[in-house]
Amino acid sequence: MTTQPSRKLSHHHLGPFVIEQQLFPAPKDPIPGCCPNPPPPPVLINHKEKYEVEEILDSCLFQHKLQFKVKWKGYGIKDISWELQENVHAPALV
């Protein structure tokens, strides 16, 4: 006899449960399409890791320094960031 107010809440209805039969294998991605492909690794430039710039979207002066709004190659729109001019190594896009 338990001290629970209902038989349904007694310890007999708690896990761990025995898996009797597996109907199909579980997918690696339980919600298909929710996990995108991993972004590309950085490239080596002058023995330093640098990320590739896909596009320069905008520019502005902030505290007397030029900044670029950068879309990184292989990354989504949530990863767009403002970077100082000296941190952007994409002369063809600037």
Image: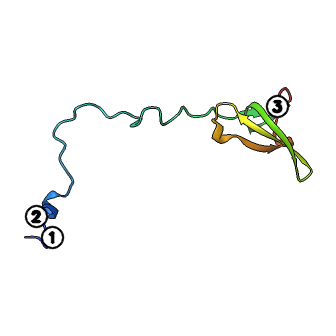
Give the quarter of the figure containing the C terminus. top right
Cα gap from disc 2 to disc 3, whole angstroms? 69 Å
The outermost residue toward the top is 92
Report which residue position mark 3 lands on.
90
- Whole-number angstrom distance, CA of label 1 to CA of label 2: 7 Å
Identify the residue under disc 2: 7
What residue is rendered at 21% in x and 55% in y? 15
Q: Give the crowd class for mark 2: few <14, some 14-19, many >=20 residues within 10 Å.
A: few
Q: Position of residue 72 (x, y in %)?
A: 70, 34
- Could you say which quadrant of the image residue 78 lies in? top right
> Element under label 2?
helix
Mark 1 or mark 3, which is nearer to you?
1
Q: Position of residue 67 (x, y in %)?
A: 84, 43
Residue at figure coordinates x 15%, y 70% from the top left: 4
Q: CA distance from mark 1 to mark 3?
A: 68 Å
Residue 42, position as x, y percentages in the image? 69, 35
Quarter of the figure with the N terminus: bottom left
Q: Residue at x 17, y 47 (%)?
A: 18
Nearer-the-camera pick, 43 or 69 = 69
Look at the numbered discs 2 and 3 and tell me whether their residues touch, using CB distance below 8 Å.
no
Secondary structure type for disc 1: loop
Earlier-in-chain disc, 1 versus 3:
1
Under circle 3, the secondary element is: loop
Q: Which residue is mark 1?
A: 4
Q: Residues within 10 Å of mark 1 (few under 14, many from 20)?
A: few
Give neighbour class at mark 3: few <14, some 14-19, many 20+ (Cα, 10 Å). Answer: few
Say whether disc 2 or disc 3 marks the residue closer to the N-terminus.
Answer: 2
